[in-house]
Image (cartoon, rainbow, N blue to C red):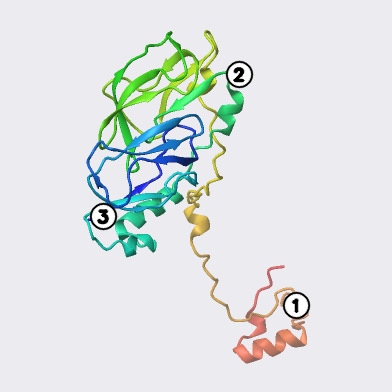
Amino acid sequence: MAIVVNMPRLSDTMEEGTVAKWLKQVGDVISEGDILAEIETDKATMEFESFNEGTLLHIGIQEGDAAPVDALLAIIGEKGEDISALLSGGAPAAEAAVSAAEVTAPVVVATATATALPEGVIVVNMPRLSDTMEEGTVATWLKKVGDVIEEGDILAEIETDKATMEFESFNAGTLLHIGIGEGEAAPVDSLLAIIGPKGADISAALNPVAAPVAAKTVATAPVAVNDAAAAPVATPTPKAPVADATAVNASVQTGRIFASPLAKKLAKEKGISLSEVKGTG
């Protein structure tokens, strides 16, 4: 099965690479460990070895051309294998899903940290030393905190998903901090080390300023309601209209009942004798 080899990120700040020279040609048989090409990063020209074996079926970036990290660099597979689907951008669903997840995954904003670092202090992250590397394990540290580092010095040996490789420094200064101990694994872009002037304050790099967090919708807890207030209010049963007590005067000494025409009418309709109604005042 053909394997797509992408432009690797050979330094922690590399965004694109330029193929300085191809050491293999289409049709050549490739063995694991063979040097495929020399690639110029933003800091140095490095040899890029193959982690796969087979026949070099396709070269995607010509000598002198630059391309972003993860661009199609080459295809290795069996001689005569059909790679048209890979050239047309076809990819297995699982691979496409991973790519989509990488694109949509939240990105850690390092701007606040970078601006807070003292001059000359450089954060070195776990590099992606192969096109499929997701995490690396520090096999051996060749430098220790306090050592003076020159550009090109080998800092550590790092195990990728395919091989153990030497990782050299692209910066000069003093090794101020080691972020991943020997035998420990960490994802690509994790803090590997800090290099800078001796005695520099690196607290800002060790405790980066948190990026602003999007406002969250806070679910309001249900408010407890007094049962009495929540209970439906009983609707009073309508009572039969009664003659207005203020309109009825049954206590007049003459015995004559004084009532308004409305009171008399209501009393008649309800069969009530106004003489028997006692006013309440």
Callout 1: SS: loop
Callout 3: SS: loop
Which disc, if any, is residue 2? 3
Q: Which residue is drawn at 55% across and 71% down?
A: 236
Which disc, if any, is residue 119? 2
- Kindly report the distance in space between the C-alpha atoms of the residues bearing marks 1 and 3: 106 Å
Q: Nearer the viewer, residue 100 or 172?
A: 172
Q: In which quarter of the image is residue 144?
A: top left
According to the picture, the residue beneath numbered tag 1 turns out to be: 247
Q: Which residue is drawn at 53% across and 49% down?
A: 217
Q: Disc 1 or disc 2, which is closer to the eye?
A: 2
The image shows residue 4 at horizontal and vertical percentages of 32, 51
Structural crowding at the residue carrying mark 2, measured as other residues with C-alpha within 10 Å and reported as few (<14), some (14–19) or many (≥20): few
The image shows residue 52 at horizontal and vertical percentages of 24, 44
Circles 1 and 2, Cβ within 8 Å, touching? The answer is: no
Circles 1 and 3, Cβ within 8 Å, touching? The answer is: no
Task: Name the N-terminal-most of marks 2 and 3.
Answer: 3
Q: Quadrant of residue 265?
A: bottom right
